[in-house]
Image: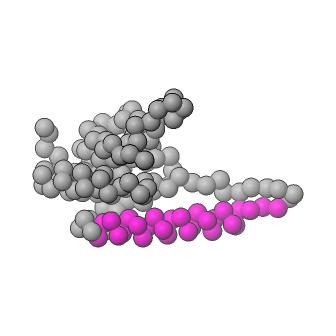
């Protein structure tokens, strides 16, 4: 097994994240590696129009609330794991693309993330874990979680 120096824990903040967090914590500790946390917020459509009314301001308010909630959750998990603020990464965009960018920017050599083992239509459309695997230049540890 490779010696990892920088582990990126990608979280989606679903209720099943504890197993993923524990696995990343153990791998980082076993390798004496630095641990970084990443959460990606998928952007909401910023404006809708109906009967010449714009809902842009309401969507901005919702997006701001989502961001504040994500920041609080990221800080909470980071505090429990002893991760410094500069390694609490909150991004907005397409999750796989943002994971790839964080890997490059922070010289990550292992990504730890969850997977639900998609099937049927979800498998055909692809999952975030599958999207991350394609094009990433480091190892990826997917932790199987159940619904």
- Name the image quarter holding residue 96: top left
How far from the left and from the top, in percent, is residue 41? 50, 56
List x then y, in percent, for residue 27. Answer: 18, 50
Q: Could one spot residue 84 in this view of the protein?
A: no
Q: Percent position (x, y) of residue 86?
A: 31, 65
State the image quarter where residue 128 is shown: top left
Residue 47 or residue 127, whichever sits in front: 127
Main SS, magenta region, reads helix
State the residue in front, 99 or 80: 80
- Residue at 18% from the left image edge and 54% from the top image edge: 26
Q: Residue furthest front?
A: 147
- Left/right placement of residue 90 relative to residue 122 reads left
Which corner quadrant holds the N terminus?
A: top left
Task: Tell me where residue 24 appears, x and y as whole percent.
Answer: 25, 52
50 above or below 64? above
**In the figure, is residue 140 to the left or right of 100?**
left
Residue at 43 percent of width and 47 percent of height: 147
In this view of the protein, which residue sits in the foreground, 94 or 14? Answer: 14
Q: Residue at x 33, y 65 (%)?
A: 77
Residue 42 left/right relative to 89: right
Q: Which residues are magenta?
A: 53-79
What residue do we see at 38% from left, 54% from top?
16
Seen as rendered, the residue at the extreme right is 51
Find out whether residue 60 is within the magenta segment: yes
Task: Check residue 1 for magenta coloring.
Answer: no
* Residue 94 appears in the figure: yes
Residue 5 to residue 80: above or below? above
């Amino acid at each position: 097994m490779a010696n990892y120096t920088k582990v990126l824990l990608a979280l989606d903040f679903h209720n099943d994240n504890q197993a993923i967090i524990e696995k990343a914590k153990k791998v980082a500790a076993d390798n004496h590696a630095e641990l970084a946390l990443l959460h990606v917020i998928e952007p909401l459509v910023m404006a809708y129009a109906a009967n010449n009314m714009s809902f842009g301001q309401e969507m901005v308010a919702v997006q701001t609330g989502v961001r504040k909630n994500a920041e609080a959750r990221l800080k909470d998990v980071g505090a429990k794991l002893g991760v410094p603020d500069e390694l609490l990464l909150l991004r907005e965009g397409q999750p796989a693309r943002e994971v790839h960018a964080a890997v490059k920017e922070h010289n990550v050599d292992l990504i730890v993330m969850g997977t639900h083992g998609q099937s049927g239509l979800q498998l055909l459309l692809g999952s975030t874990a599958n999207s991350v695997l394609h094009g990433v230049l480091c190892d990826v540890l997917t932790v199987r979680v159940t619904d």
